[in-house]
Image: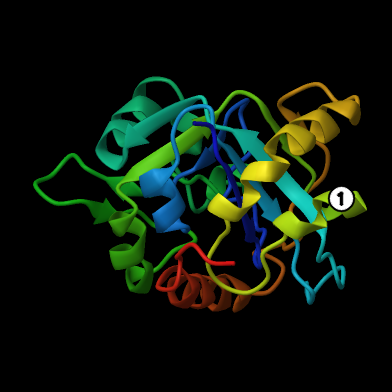
């Protein structure tokens, strides 16, 4: 049975999700969603009440992706080397999208090694607990131009930590119909992320620490 997952994307920085290079991927953060979501499911990240750069985006869709593939994290590392090399972060690259790569774990050794990236060793445990990477070739990324949900879909909004799934079941057909009535071609990246991690040297560490704390509470709730 197809599911609709929704959660509050407090820190939209272009890494989780990573909407670049023609494939939207959720490879780090949200470990419970990454473990349980299946091909065909929808993942929806809605805005926060207090985004530092643009204010209140609660009740607005930051991104939506229909899962088309699910990899183990080790499989994803190999896949990016073969097919999506630009998803592997290059921390000193002048293109910010290359620095935001989400294939941040190197599985070429007997244990996964964290590449230099947006996450720190404090994130490793929760990142790896997700076990899987979700990928989509049918997604819509709005970023800093988030789109308000219609009133009849506001019940899918999940503020705070965790995510919604079971309670969203009645709203899945409506959501699919609504997202496609926007008239956008799939795989659309409409805007930059809500946060620019490289504008403030301390912001990347702040976001990494906050994500580590949030991911400890990534459970399904009302």
Residue at the (53%, 77%) spot, across then down = 210
Number of marks drawn:
1
Q: Residue furthest front?
A: 170
Q: Position of residue 146 (x, y in %)?
A: 84, 51
Q: Position of residue 153 (x, y in %)?
A: 81, 50
Task: Inspect this view and state whether residue 148 appears.
Answer: no
Question: Would residue 26 be found to the left or right of residue 4 on screen?
Answer: left
**62, 178: nearer the viewer:** 178
In the rendered image, which quarter is residue 140 located in?
top right
Badge 1 element: helix
Q: Position of residue 197 (x, y in %)?
A: 65, 64
- The quadrant of the picture occupied by the C terminus is bottom right
**115, 171: nearer the viewer:** 171
In the rendered image, which quarter is residue 109 located in?
top left
Q: How is the image coloured?
A: rainbow
Task: Inspect this view and state whether residue 86 appears.
Answer: yes
Q: Is residue 145 above or below residue 8?
A: above
- Residue pointed to by mark 1: 152
């Amino acid at each position: 049975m197809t599911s609709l997952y929704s959660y509050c994307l407090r820190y939209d920085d272009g890494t989780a999700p990573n909407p670049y290079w023609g494939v939207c991927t959720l490879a780090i953060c949200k470990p419970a969603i990454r473990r349980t979501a299946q091909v065909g499911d929808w993942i929806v990240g809605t805005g926060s009440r207090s985004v530092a750069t643009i204010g209140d985006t609660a009740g607005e869709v930051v991104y939506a992706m229909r899962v088309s593939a699910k990899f183990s994290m080790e499989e994803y590392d190999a896949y990016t080397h073969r097919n999506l090399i630009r998803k592997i972060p290059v921390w000193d690259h002048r293109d910010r999208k290359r620095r935001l790569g989400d294939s941040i774990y190197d599985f070429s050794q007997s244990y996964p090694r964290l590449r230099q990236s947006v996450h720190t060793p404090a994130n490793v445990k929760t990142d790896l607990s997700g076990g899987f990477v979700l990928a989509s070739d049918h997604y819509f990324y709005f970023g800093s131009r988030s789109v308000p949900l219609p009133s009849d879909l506001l019940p899918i909004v999940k503020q705070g930590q965790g995510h919604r799934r079971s309670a969203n079941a009645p709203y899945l057909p409506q959501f699919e119909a609504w997202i496609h009535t926007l008239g956008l071609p799939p795989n659309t990246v409409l805007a930059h992320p809500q946060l620019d991690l490289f504008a403030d040297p301390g912001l990347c560490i702040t976001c990494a620490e906050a994500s580590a704390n949030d991911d400890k509470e990534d459970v399904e709730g009302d």
